[in-house]
Amino acid sequence: MTDETRKIAFICSKGTLDMAYPALIMGWAALGNGIDVTIFFTFWGMDIINKARVDHLEIAPVANTSMKMSMMGVDTGNLGIPNLMGVLPGMTAFATSLMKSKMNKLEVPPVREYLQMLVDAGAKLYACKMSVDMMDLKMEDFVDGVIDIVTAGDFIDMTDGAQIIFV
Amino acid sequence: MATRDIAGKTVQVNDEGFMTNPDEWEKNIAIEIAKEEGIVELTPAHWQVIEFCRKKAAESGAAPTLRAITTGSGISTKDLFTLFPKGPAKKVAKISGLGKPEGCV
């Protein structure tokens, strides 16, 4: 063990509900253990910090081979959700509400609240400059706690010595 | 099981230094462990957290998670991280004479 504080940086590149959580959960655990946490949001991950999107992240059963019928309460073992069924209107909303209710039962906070917890605990959040330009976003589109819009180079500079986890 | 002497008492601890029998804990022990963890003085706000954890652990048998502390003790996330800087998860549990919190949130 060195005296220097361990640092972890997460890159959040996905905007689906299931992929929003890994960095939040690990980041919170890291902060709880006294580790310095930086999170960089890029591409679809911008949805996680977008005020208009953060409460509406979804999970789609289409092309998701890990999502099984049994998760929807139908006891069919390893039988997947047929893609043909996944395309039916309402299936994404249904899968999303199912995941949200399971998380809720485990007392896992919703994404917006989770982000606020991380910020309160000292995590530093940054938005990717190229994604901001590409998606016509501005600082005011983001939830509180996003410190700045930075370039890839800035991110590399600020994460000197950090362990980087790409999600 | 290892033991250690602290605040004039011999208590059982595991290899990470967490006390294994919450009944052996007393306030003087908390004050001593806090000092070892870099917290010079335990203020009423610290005690509010410690007492909440002791109560929760007595009910459930496990140290509460950070989120359980911030939603139940009346101490905010910001304050918790200020009161127990650099890793409140283990510090709070250790000072409260409990094991590591179980659960991810």
Image: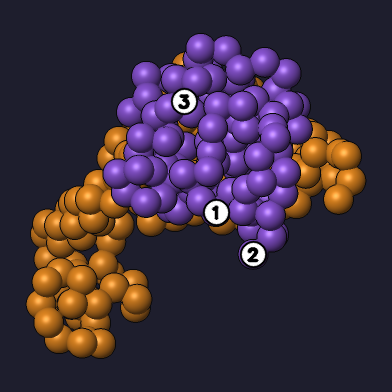
Chain colours: A orange, B purple
Give the letter of the chain under mark 2. Answer: B
Q: Secondary structure at mark 2?
A: loop
Tell me where residue B14 appears, x and y as whole percent.
64, 58
Q: Quadrant of residue A166?
A: bottom right
Residue that badge 3 annotates: B49
> Is there a contact, CB below 8 Å, between mark 3 and mark 1?
no
Is B24 located above or below residue B12 in the figure?
above
Relative side of A94 to B44, left or right: left
User: Of the numbered discs in the image, which one, if any, rests on residue B20?
Assistant: 1
Of callouts 2 and 1, the N-terminal one: 2
- Kindly identify the residue that appears in the image at 69 percent across and 60 percent down: B2
Q: CA distance from mark 3 to mark 1?
A: 19 Å
User: Of the numbered discs in the image, which one, if any, rests on residue B90?
Assistant: none
Of badges 3 and 1, nearer the viewer stands: 1
Farthest top residue in view: B44
Q: Quadrant of residue A155?
A: top right
